[in-house]
Image: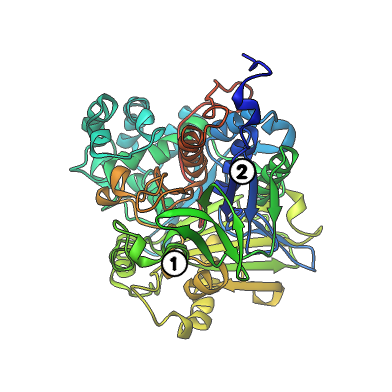
Amino acid sequence: MTAPLSSPALHRPRPKVAIIGAGPGGLAAAMMLAASGARVTVFEKDNVVGGRTRTLATDQGYKFDLGPTFFLYPRILKEIFSRCGADLEQEIDMRRLEPQYRLIFEQGGSTTQIEASADMARMEAAIAGISPKDAKGLRPFMEENRAKLAAFRPVLERAFSTAADMIRPDMIKALPLMKPWSTVDRDLARHFSDPRVRLAFSFQTKYLGMSPFKCPALFTILSFLEYEHGIFHPIGGCGAVSVAMAKVAERLGAEIRLNAPVERIGFEGRRAKGVEIGGVRHDADAVVVNADFAHAIPRLIPDHLRKGWKDRKIGQAKYSCSTFMLYLGLDRELPELAHHNVLLSEGYQENIAQIERGDIPEVPSLYVQHAGATDPTMAPKGHSALYVLVPVPNLIKQPDWPAQAARYREIALDRLKVLGLPDLRPHIKYERIVAPQDWESDFAVGFGATFNLSHELPQMLLFRPGNRFRDVEGVYLVGGGTHPGSGLPVIYEGARITTGLMAQDLGLASAPSRPTAGGDFAAATPAAAYGPDR
């Protein structure tokens, strides 16, 4: 209903919101807050938007995703775009991949492959090629996780602010299906006996930087989502999604300031009153922090103002693994590769144990994206842009990484031969390495832990940093370091939770709605995208 001309609401100043960081969460928040009537300014330290979800473009014409390389569950973002008067399908060209990715298992000096398909009959046949008796476990696995997801989804879509939120009816209903006493691998063993088949449905815990042998059983929903709802590639890479979000935010009146590193949040007592850049205060009624939690919070908020997340607690928290990255521009095409390729070493479980101990795997598993299999915009004609990700220890576990990077480059390049590639060294025309120390120094990732705070049960829900940061007043969080957690769609959902709280606190138009999404993007529930998120 339109307010009458005499309504005091017409004369109330529009709240000013400062957002620190133009990563996925910050951009989603900017869109929704601007659509709700706030005056929004986004302060981004770099010269591009997207945070880790950006595109690296080179002078030679190669383009790479920096972090996430594929997109799951477009429904949340579709709903956010719709809430902001835009159409995701008109703004971004999303291509659903089929097959979704290629899995390569090493065993006894040879390899076995699965072309992972969302077609259940085709996937059953692929599983039968490895373990005939396990094929019959696929559909029961899907049915069980469909129910798990339906029960747990309401929990992922709301804030956890007080202890009472842990005993609400939706949580009590979801708890038995979460199986907090079990792990992903153990839960999958009820459906699949062959370790390789279980690995096909559990390696996705690496999207959270975690081990399937320790990750809570809840996260079997990750692989379910891939097979139920598909994997998408945005033409131009995932960075194109960030660019489109920034354009929508600016159309709604948000201002995005690049090359504007925030030094600290300005406080009056315990209440945030703005942000400081170059010693200059930029006033705001509320501040949203989209920067990496472990790296940013000790710098932005004085320790004495933080009761729940003091520097000591942040330093002693559990963090994900890191990643060793190679971005290679090659002067040849790569017909040998699928779009997404996951090499699972025979010593996969030992790889994980090594990473957890702080040892650097000498025969690592790895992930390789060859976006040119789908997207010709990522490299010049006749060339290829290759993205190589190797899970490795973070800087807490392995502080000696700077001395290891050059040696590990050779190990990673040699491992590519297992994918059927020859020695690529003579074909490399562009190369960039991002090792754990580079994640920390160049991209402000705390401890080089590219998947943020780990998702162990003591660091989830109420025990994760809150969307409304409880230590001070007027500070809100978005990103992988807050509830509900890491991964692009989860971060978008988190931004929706955060902006809903802010709408209440600031008297904005309304919390973002959740319309039912139509179109080609099938409905699902939050998942993660492979690669370091923001």
Dot 1 alpha-carbon crowd within 10 angstroms: few under 14, some 14 to 19, many 20 or more: many
Along the line of sight, the residue nearer the viewer: 281 or 28: 281
| Residue 97 visible in the snapshot | no
* Residue found at the very far bottom of the displayed protein: 403
Q: CA distance from mark 2 to mark 1?
A: 24 Å
Residue 431: quarter of image: bottom right
In percent of width and height, residue 111 lies at: 44, 57
The kind of secondary structure element at disc 1 is helix
The kind of residue on which mark 2 rests is Ala
In percent of width and height, residue 45 lies at: 63, 64
In percent of width and height, residue 298 lies at: 41, 66
Residue 81: quarter of image: top right
Q: Residue at x 58, y 23 (%)?
A: 517
Q: Where, quadrant-wise, is the N terminus in this rendering?
A: top right
In percent of width and height, residue 65 lies at: 63, 57
Q: Considering only order in the chain, which callout, 1 or 2, is on the residue closer to the N terminus?
A: 2
| Residue 310 visible in the snapshot | yes
Residue, disc 2: 30
Residue 145: quarter of image: top left
43 versus 128 height, above or below: below
The kind of secondary structure element at disc 2 is helix
Please name which of the two marks, 2 or 1, marks the residue nearer to the observer. 2
Along the line of sight, the residue nearer the viewer: 41 or 333: 41
Q: Are marks 2 and 1 in contact (CB under 8 Å)?
A: no
The tag on residue 160 is: none
Does residue 477 appear left or right of residue 240 in this picture? left
The kind of residue on which mark 1 rests is Gly
Residue, disc 1: 446
Q: Residue at x 44, y 79 (%)?
A: 401
